[in-house]
Amino acid sequence: MIEFLDVHASYDGTTPILKGIDLTIEDGEFVAFVGTNGAGKSTAMRLVNGLLKPDRGAVLIDGVPTTQLKTSELARRVGFLFQNPDRQICSSTVRDELLFGFQAVGRLDDEARRRVDQIIEEFRFDGDADPFLLNRGTRQLLALASIVVLAPPVVVLDEPTTGLDFCECVKVMGIISQLHRAGTTVIMVCHDMEVVADFAERVVVMTDGRVVDQGPTFDVLRNRKTLDEADLVPPQMVDVSLLLPVMEPRFAGTSVATANTLAEMQAAIEDVAAGGAAAMAASEKDALDDVPFQGSERKER
Amino acid sequence: MDGFLEYVPGNSFLHRLNPVTKIAFAIMFAIACFCTGNLVFLCLMLALGLALAASCSMMRQTLGLMRAVLAFSLVLAVLLLLTTPKGDLLVELPWGYIGSDSILAAVVTVIRLEAAAIPLFLTFYVTKMTDLSNSFVKVLHVPYRYAFTFASTVHFIPVFMNDMRGIMEAQTARGVEFDQGGMVRKIRLMVPLCVPLLISSVRKTNSSAIAAEVRGFNLRTRESGYKRYPMTGADWAVIALGVVVLAAAIALSLL
C-alpha cells in the first residue's frame, strides 16, 4: 500500500510543487494521475520511488517512509518507467540491458538469467540486438521489459505512451494490463484520456499541486465541473454520453450514467440512439398518417 | 530552477552592457589573475568579482560556482603542495618537503582560480547566448559559423548536464546507488551512463545541425541579424577598467 500523508514537495526547497497531498493507493490497484502540465503529477511519481523526498509530510510504502529506505530497496519495491527510454537504456545488448537491473540491486544469479531469457521470449526481442538501433516503440518496450523482469510489486509509469504510434501504444498498454491482472499495483501519469478510460480503475485529478478529485474512472470522467477545473477533455465517448439524456436501458442493460467501461458506455449510447431513432420513426409515422397520399388523390381525379 | 551557465533575466548594469564588453572584461580579468601571484591583489580581484555578482543579484549562482571551482582547485593545490618544495621546511616527504612558500603557492592557486572564474561565468548568466554570438558577428566581425559554434558549445553544456542528471535519476530508480560509497565506486557506476549521454548528444547535435541547415544557416551573413550592438560610454569605461586591472597585474608581476 502507498500512502501520501499531507505531502508538500519542491525541487529547490522554495517553490512548492505539491501543496498537501493526502492519498492512499491499495495493493493491486490501477490508478491514473491526470491533470495539465505543471499540475504536480510527475513530482508525485518521483516521491513514490524516492527520487524526491517530501519537504513536509510522508510517503509510505507498505508503512515505511521512503526517507528510511535505501535506493536499491525502493527499486526492488517500485519499478519506474520514464517517458524517455533513452535515459534508462545504457547497455550494448538487449540481454545486458535486462540484466542491468538485477546487477544494480545485487541479484545477478542464474535465476536472473533464466528470467531474462523468459522475458526476451515473451517480448519477442533479439537478445543480441543493440538497443540504441531499435525504433522508439521497441526501445520503450525494452525499458518496460527491464522493469517487468524485476517483477516489482508496484510499477510507476510516467506517460508511457508518449511518442508511440497506435500499435505500439496498444502493445505497451497490453503488457501493463497483463501486469495489473497478475496483481501488480500500477500507477500511471497519462495525458491520453482514452487510454485512462480504457485501463485505469481509479483516476486522481491534480491541479496546481493539489488533488482536486479522485474516484472510480467513469465517475470522475463524467464530472464536468472537475474536468473543467483541471482543464481536461474527457474521451469522446464520455463527452457524447454527457450530451445525452439519462434514459432507462432498453437493450444493453446499462445507462450512460452508470457505465464503467468504454464498451459499456458505447452500448449505452447505442441504446439511447436506438431508442431515439425508434421514437423519431414513430413520430414520423404518425405525421405521415395525417398527410393524405397525393398519388391516390391524383388517381381519383 | 536556474541551470548551470543558463541566462538569468534581469536589468542590472551588467545585463545592459554590450556582450562584447562583458566577455572582453572577463578575459582581461582572468589574464590579470594569472599574471601575478600577489595574494593581496588576488584577494581584491576576488572581492571585485563578488561585488560584480552582487550588483546583478547572482550571489547564489556565484557561490554555487565557487564551490565547484573550489573542489577542482583544491586538487591542484594539494598537488602543488606535494610537488613544489619551497620556503622554510615544514613537513618532510620521501621525495622532498612541504615548505612555507608551498602553502602560500597552494593558497594563491585556489584564490586565483576562484577569482578568475567568477567574471567569466557571470558573463554567461547575464548574457543571452544569441546576443553573445550575434554581437561577435556584428561588432567583432567574426564569421557567423564560428560564433554559432562557440555559442552552441556553451549552450549544450547545461543541456548535457540536465541529460546526465536525468540519466542518473533513471538509473537510481533502477537501484544504482550513486549516493553510497567512495569516489572510485561512483566513477565506476557512472562509466556505463556515458553511453546514453553520448547517444543523446549525438542525436541532439544531429537534429540541431539539420534544423540549422533547413532554416538557411549557410545563407546567413553579418547583416542578417536585425539587432544592433552599439558600444556606449559605459562599455568603454568597463573596458578601460579591465585595461587598468590588467596593467596593474602586469606591473605587480614585474616589480
Image: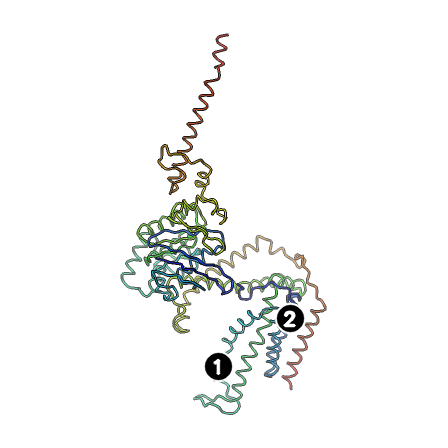
Residue B79: image tag? 1
Asked if one can make out residue A91 in the rendered structure from this viewpoint, the answer is no
What secondary structure is marked by label 1? Answer: helix
The chain to which mark 1 is attached is B
Residue type at the position of mark 1: Leu
- Residue A222 vs B48, above or below: the answer is above
User: Residue B92: horizontal and vertical position, in percent?
Assistant: 45, 90
Q: Nearer the viewer, residue B137 or A284?
A: A284
- Residue A172 vs B170, above or below: the answer is above
Does mark 1 fall on the same chain as mark 2?
yes
* Mark 2 burial class by Cα count in 10 Å: few <14, some 14-19, many 20+: some
In the rendered structure, the answer to whether residue A200 lies left or right of residue B204 reads left
What secondary structure is marked by label 2? Answer: helix
Quadrant into which the N terminus of chain A falls:
bottom left
Query: Disc 2 marks which residue?
Result: B24
- What is the CA distance from the residue labelled 2 to the residue labelled 1? 31 Å
Colour style of the rendered protein structure:
rainbow
Residue at image point 37% right, 32% down: A250
Residue type at the position of mark 2: Ala
Residue A171: image tag? none
In the rendered structure, the answer to whether residue A180 lies left or right of residue B166 reads left
User: Residue B150: horizontal and vertical position, in percent?
Assistant: 58, 65
Going from N to C along the chain, the mark reached first, 2 or 1, is 2
In the current view of this chain or complex, which residue is farthest to the bottom? B88
* Mark 1 burial class by Cα count in 10 Å: few <14, some 14-19, many 20+: few
The chain to which mark 2 is attached is B
* Residue B31, picture quadrant: bottom right
Asked if one can make out residue A228 in the rendered structure from this viewpoint, the answer is yes
Q: Nearer the viewer, residue A210 or B70?
A: A210
In the current view of this chain or complex, which residue is farthest to the top? A301
User: Residue A218: horizontal and vertical position, in percent?
Assistant: 40, 44
